[in-house]
Amino acid sequence: MVKINLELSLFKENILLMSSRVYKMHEDALKALKTSDKDLALSIIESDEYVNNDEESVNRRALEVLALLAPVASDLRIIIAGIKIATDLERMGDYAKNIARFILKNDPVLDEQMILIEEIYHVYLDFLNKVMEAFENNDLDAAFALPKMDEEIDLLIKNLFFKLEEVELNDPNTIRLIPLVGMARNIERAGDHTKNICEQIIYETTGQYYDFG
Amino acid sequence: MENSFSINNLNLFYGDKQALKNISMDISRYEVTAFIGPSGCGKSTLLRCLNRMNDLIPNVRIEGDIVFDQENINKDKIDVVQLRTRVGMVFQKPNPFPMSIYENVVYGLRCQNIKDKNVLNKVCENSLRKAALWDEVKDRLNDNAYGLSGGQQQRLCIARAIAMEPEVILMDEPTSALDPIATAKIEELIQELKKDYTIIIVTHSMHQAARISDKTAFFLMGEVIEMGETRNLFHVPKDKRTEDYITGRFG
Amino acid sequence: MRKFNIKDLILDGITYLFSSVSLILLVIIFIFIFQKGFSSLNLELFTSPYWSENYYASIPASNNTYLLKSTLDSNEYYSEKFGIALKDDFNARNEAIVVISYVHPDSPFNELTNSTSGANEGQIITAQEGMIVNKISYINSNGVTRSAGPVIKQMAEDTINTIEKSDQLDSVFLQTQGGGIFGSLIATIMLILISLLISLPIGIMTAIYLNEYAKYNRFTPWIRSSIELLTGVPSIVFGLMGVLVLFPITSVFGASGTSILLGGLTLSIILLPVIIRTTEESLKVVPDSFREASHSLGANHSQTIFKIIIPAALPGILTATILSIGRIIGESAALIYTMGTYISDKPELLKGATSLAVQIWSIMNGDQPNFGLASAISIIILVMVLVMNIGVKVLTRSKVKKW
């Protein structure tokens, strides 16, 4: 049954390509934030088109494999999990796009706030990278361990909000901090979707549905 | 739900060669149980044990128990002929007798010395209806059975088995000689039949097993590797060998 | 460009030559037989007895004129006084004879009284067409009994003219022509019935036993080989065996010497291997799927055999029967010893008789071999065997397995 082996590995490759595109989008978003690079922001928005196409092609390929090869058991689970991961990745792409839009519409962020965001974003990028590695290698242990990082991200964002609360409402600088909330939310949601990918990896390998909350 | 068959430590030998190794399983009533596995792994052999058809083959030695209706059918004092009226069989290649459709259906009854025309007619109609063949043949019951298409002949064989009012119907790859449409008709028929009969089907197509069975047993080299609810076995099989077989990694 | 290979040409030539030789030989045989026998073939052959019967009968007095109701051929000579027509003919040995060609329904020749001493004395005989007239005694005008007919070298015309001159006939010497095969035909039919009655049931049951009951028995191959061996034994050996071994059985029934019963018994043993083998072949061809299906429906062994297998094997059994009949018709050596060589016109079970083939032997073995009659019978036998073989072919083709 060489054909199904080939199809499934191409399928997973597609997803990995899509995920590296999404990773780059977020990497670039962080860069653009630091330097307020509006051109970079534009290219991020463009990339989102490609990411949407990627999701479509993942879906199409999944349908083909299902219709023609009638996979069962683990083969079937690869397809099901893959479709869901592609959806998650597509959402993650949207969040990067949102951040890029913000960069386009607004003035650069102040340095002190930048530091906070940068730290969160680094954790997130690391998280995404490790999760996609776990997906590539079917690493079940990693899939169980990694969602911790999302907790870390949530914690850092909570701290950020605490700090923001301390800021005076009358300070004109405050107004510039409001978008930070939005960005942080984007990163938080992107983290949640990345955590979903862990759940899909567990499903693909064991057939069990796990909810990390 | 009580069991139709309970098999315990069944071993079967063709001369010196062991064809079935330590088979133990329960088969539930009013369900479709499928036996799957590569060629020559013993699934048909086990099926034929359930109605003692292996008696017709020389040099066969059977050890172990098969309990049907609280009796061990492997004990010699069992009336094998009577057993076969309660456990019917349909074969891979449709094999109607060279007689009329009517005579085919009532053959088993005649062998039981039932001669009353009214009874025979009624049973014939009922069986053909249950086998979803009545409408197609009701006007030509006296025609030779060979005038029917392959799929119709197989349904005739099913009607013939049903006419004996068995409790169990054994099917040995019943659709492997048929085209896809005839196959689909028979698969539909099996879903209807399981309301009244226990059905055990040997099939080469795992997809067929996945489509129509409630429970599936995977055989390999004379042993049952895994048996369970079909929806589980095809979703997350417990044994790697099962997984390799149903995903087609070896066949 | 054709390559001329000398070796191939020579081989081809030899093949064609030898095949033509066989073909020519066959054709010559057929032509010979047909030529000799065709003229003797007529419908009376089937109904008349072999031995000619002699009748010496007295003719009742008559005083009427018997007018012709139908027209006669130019070679027939009619006597209106006595209502009888005679014509010239030739017998099987090509000697000139005078036969009766017509008898008026009211003629005194219908009520002749048999005057030959013996069992039939006094019986009323009816003169019939085809009977040979040797002598007619008449009373002439002087009251003297004189003879007319071939006995004084008169042929039909002269005979009729002579008796027309007389007023009263005295007696007539008649002969039936004979040379028929009626007796042998009956004997052959009796033979067929007896042999088949014995060998068919035994042979079929044996075949069923070998193929259905004892299929996996160790001894079965041995039994089969022995049966095969029997098919090669020359039939004369069976004949001798019949005389030695089976004769006591027939004497229990009252036969003393050769008899149809003995011939039938011997023949049934000759036929047994053929029937067993053919029946077994037809049983083997019945697919196992039938047996399986029958058993799976709860039929026991004998029901399967008698309801399914035998009906399915029927064409083969029929073939066996027809082949056997062909063999019976053609058998001669074994029958010569067991059934005898005396041609009987009224065959009886416990007495000797001849089958058609043996009749040929008898005819040719006597001091006056009758080639014509022998060839005529050969033609009849050939036709019967041909019909049997065609019958077998037609049966096996039409019943070519629907399954």
Image: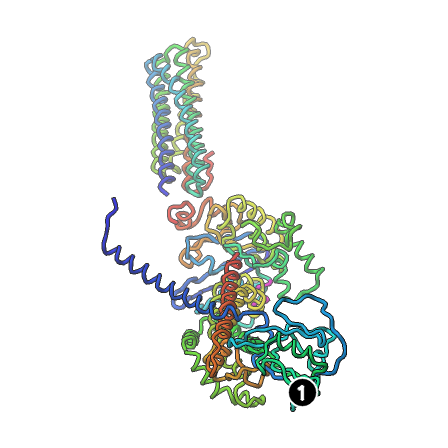
Q: Tag 1's secondary structure?
A: strand
Q: Which residue ends up furthest to the top in the rendered image?
A: A172
Asked whether residue B206 is drawn in magenta, I would say no
Q: Quadrant of residue A99?
A: top left
Asked whether residue B81 is drawn in magenta, I would say yes
Main SS, magenta region, reads helix
* Closer to the camera in the image, C179 or B244: C179
Q: Is residue C174 left or right of residue A193?
A: right
For image coordinates 40% across by 75% down, the residue present is: C232
- Residue C92, compared with residue B36, is above or below; it is below
Q: Position of residue A46 (x, y in %)?
A: 38, 17
Q: Which residue ends up furthest to the right in the rendered image?
A: C63
Q: Quadrant of residue A156?
A: top left
- Residue A42, compared with residue C21, is above or below; it is above
For image coordinates 53% across by 58% down, the residue present is: C398
Q: Position of residue C29 (x, y in %)?
A: 42, 68
> Dot 1 corresponds to which residue?
C145
Q: How many marks?
A: 1
Position of the N terminus of chain C, as image quadrant, is top left
Q: Quadrant of residue A105?
A: top left
- Residue A202, compared with residue A32, is above or below; it is below
Question: What chain does badge 1 belong to?
Answer: C
Magenta residues, as a range? Answer: B79-85
The answer to whether residue B62 shows anywhere in this view is no
Q: Position of residue C268 (x, y in %)?
A: 51, 78
Amino acid type, mark 1: Thr
